[in-house]
Image (cartoon, helix red, strand yellow):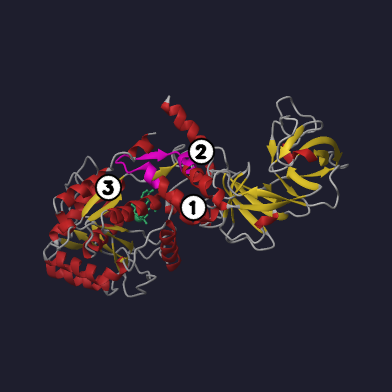
């Protein structure tokens, strides 16, 4: 409930921006950016940041840049750049021509570093990474000066140039800011600004063998792009003084304000590119777009409408303290959206053959079935009805308990949009003893769905005509992890231990109504009584329809929210 209420009041970031606008700070300009590193696909956590940055720009008549923060060649590539672009676009945001690459600033960043050296504010340090760590001190002990801290400016300049020229091995030297080894903020203890990395960059090629660190590149990229509000996640709070220090020391024209907000954590999944890569690389999932993944690509393939994701991001709001959002809220937003837009159709996941003994063998009726119960504008389609049908296997029991209201010998049910049928007899598979076929009779007087004598039935079940229905494969997804917080379980245990072995169930013998022939890849439907499904955009072809279940119908969020209200 807190999460829903958060949207009722303006979030603290928008409050800051409105105050700035009131004071004509930045001459009334609002410029944000979304700065992903192209070292993985975007996930729903990134969506929160996308919605926030692009949303604020739109709301206040500002601009939002898409900036690829590609300053570390390891793990970055073009595939990730393209996926980021397509995911942001799919979420519904448009950067126009405002796409930027931090790697395009390498030369300028280098010149800024030279400027710091010249002013005696940066030096080349030759300690090893291990020594640098030791010299840094701890939260309760101050650090110790590097023996190179007072290297002469000339020597620093020369060494930095030679670092760039590739004369040294990786790890031999780094460039560090000269700030304060006794600062209570460990980040300010002469942070590393540049390191040697003899790795080609996917855009810059082998032009560089030194690369700027995030803290150096990020604030300056923001500044070069004229960003006014640099919105990032809470883990950068301790880096803010460094962000400001670099911009102040270099006396740049534009000094954006860094504002931190709580990152999104979602139950039963993980939102960390590093760990998602592990799932992909070790084959725990089929790829970045596996419908179980919390990635935008995975959610898109699973059938999430972008609107539902945006609504979710709005509802969770923006806060200053970390928390884990219940995935049931995301699913609630999804159902709310799909309930409005998804046409209803019938699909049988576990078919059981039903023969209506008193229905003429060669007769076929076309039943008119509306696509949406509330929205008549979406029209209707004809669904063929004939003597042999398929119904859901668990809608029938040969010897039902008292409270079973669906089909059974001697029990009558309504077929959705059609007749009443009554169970008569069963045929069994001689080998397995399983019910193979149910024989029924129908009441020709009940085509309207009601009996003229006013008798009632307890259940309405979905069905398809055996001869007219289409074969389909259906993939049912469950949560990727068995526990709500896979990273917060036992100390030292591997998060992959908590993967849900039942997160995917593939049903290969499903039957769907013929109106779904040629259904467009990615199109979404409600299969009555079964949930929301979408046509898998990759594996579905004309002859073999493949559906992903986006989400089942039952909404646990409404229940949770209801309990909290009490
Ligand atoms: P990860 O931990 O998944 O690797 P990251 O922060 O390293 O994420 P970036 O590509 O650097 O990924 O993130 C781009 C932007 O998205 C940053 O501004 C970052 O703060 C934001 N972001 C990343 N994860 C989340 C999250 N879970 N919730 C909200 N914003 C996020
Ligand atoms: Mg990052």
Q: Is residue 365 above or below residue 218?
A: above
> Which residue is painted at 77% across and 47% down in the image?
389
Camera-side residue of 264 and 382: 382
Q: Earlier in the sequence, mark 3 or mark 1?
A: 3
Is residue 136 visible in the rendered image? The answer is no
In magenta segment, residue 517: no
Foreground: 12 or 222?
12
Q: Which residue is mark 2?
A: 483
Range shown magenta = 313-332
Distance between mark 3 and mark 2 Cα atoms: 28 Å
In this rendering, would 482 be left or right of 191?
Answer: right
Within 10 Å of disc 3 (Cα), the crowding (few <14, some 14-19, many 20+) is many
Helix or strand or loop: what does disc 1 sit on?
Answer: loop
> Which residue in the protein does label 1 denote?
305
Across and down, in percent, residue 166 comes to 30, 73
Residue visible at 37% across and 69% down in the picture = 199
How far apart marks 3 and 1 lie (CA) works out to: 28 Å
540 horizontally vs 90: left or right: right
Within the image, what quadrant is residue 528 found in?
top right
Residue at mark 3: 260
* Residue 307 visible to the viewer: yes
Q: Residue furthest front?
A: 452
């Amino acid at each position: 409930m807190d999460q829903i209420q958060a949207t009722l009041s303006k979030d603290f970031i928008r409050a800051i921006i409105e105050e700035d606008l009131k004071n004509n700070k930045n001459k009334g300009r609002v410029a944000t950016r979304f700065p992903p590193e192209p070292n993985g696909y975007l996930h729903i956590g990134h969506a929160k940041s996308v919605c926030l940055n692009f949303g604020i720009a739109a709301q206040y008549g500002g601009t939002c840049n898409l900036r690829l923060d590609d300053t570390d060649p390891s793990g970055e590539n073009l595939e990730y750049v393209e996926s980021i672009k397509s995911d942001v676009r799919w979420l519904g945001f448009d950067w126009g021509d405002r796409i930027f690459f931090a790697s395009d600033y390498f030369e300028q960043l280098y010149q800024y570093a030279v400027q710091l050296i010249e002013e005696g504010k940066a030096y080349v340090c030759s300690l090893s990474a291990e020594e640098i760590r030791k010299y840094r001190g701890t939260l309760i002990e101050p650090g110790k000066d590097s023996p190179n801290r007072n290297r002469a400016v000339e020597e620093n300049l020369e060494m930095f140039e030679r670092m760039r020229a590739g004369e040294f091995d990786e790890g031999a030297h780094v460039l560090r800011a000269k700030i304060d080894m006794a600062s209570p903020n460990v980040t300010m203890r002469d942070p590393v600004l540049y390191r040697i990395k003899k790795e080609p960059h996917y855009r810059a090629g082998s032009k560089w063998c030194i690369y700027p660190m995030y803290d150096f590149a990020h604030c300056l990229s923001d500044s070069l792009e004229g960003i006014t509000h640099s919105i990032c996640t809470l883990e950068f709070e301790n880096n803010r003084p460094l962000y400001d220090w670099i911009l102040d020391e270099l006396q740049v024209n534009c000094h954006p304000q860094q504002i931190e907000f709580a990152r999104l954590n979602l139950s039963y999944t993980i939102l960390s590119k590093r760990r998602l890569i592990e799932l992909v690389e070790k084959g725990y999932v089929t790829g970045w777009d596996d419908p179980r993944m919390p990635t935008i690509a995975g959610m898109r393939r699973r059938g999430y409408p972008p609107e539902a994701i945006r609504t979710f991001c709005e509802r969770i709001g923006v806060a200053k303290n970390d928390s884990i959002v219940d995935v049931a809220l995301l699913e609630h937003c999804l159902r709310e959206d799909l309930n409005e837009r998804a046409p209803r159709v019938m699909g049988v996941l576990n078919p059981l053959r039903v023969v209506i003994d008193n229905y003429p063998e060669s007769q076929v009726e076309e039943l008119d079935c509306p696509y949406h119960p509330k929205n008549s504008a979406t029209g209707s389609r004809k669904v063929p009805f004939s003597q042999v049908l398929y119904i859901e296997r668990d809608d029938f029991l040969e010897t039902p308990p008292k409270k079973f209201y669906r089909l059974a010998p001697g029990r009558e049910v309504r077929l959705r949009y059609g007749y009443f049928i009554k169970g008569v007899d069963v045929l069994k598979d001689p080998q397995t003893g399983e019910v193979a076929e149910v024989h029924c009779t129908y009441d020709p007087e009940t085509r309207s769905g009601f009996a003229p004598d006013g008798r009632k039935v307890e259940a309405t079940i979905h069905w398809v005509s055996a001869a007219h229905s289409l074969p389909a494969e259906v993939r049912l997804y469950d949560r990727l992890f068995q526990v709500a917080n896979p990273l917060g379980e036992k100390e030292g245990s591997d998060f992959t231990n908590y993967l849900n072995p039942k997160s995917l169930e593939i049903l290969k013998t499903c039957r769907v109504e013929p109106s779904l022939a040629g259904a467009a890849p990615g199109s979404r439907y409600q299969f009555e009584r079964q949930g929301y499904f979408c046509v898998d955009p990759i594996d579905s072809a004309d002859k073999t329809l493949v559906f992903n279940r986006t989400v089942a119908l039952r909404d646990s969020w409404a229940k949770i929210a209801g309990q909290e209200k009490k």
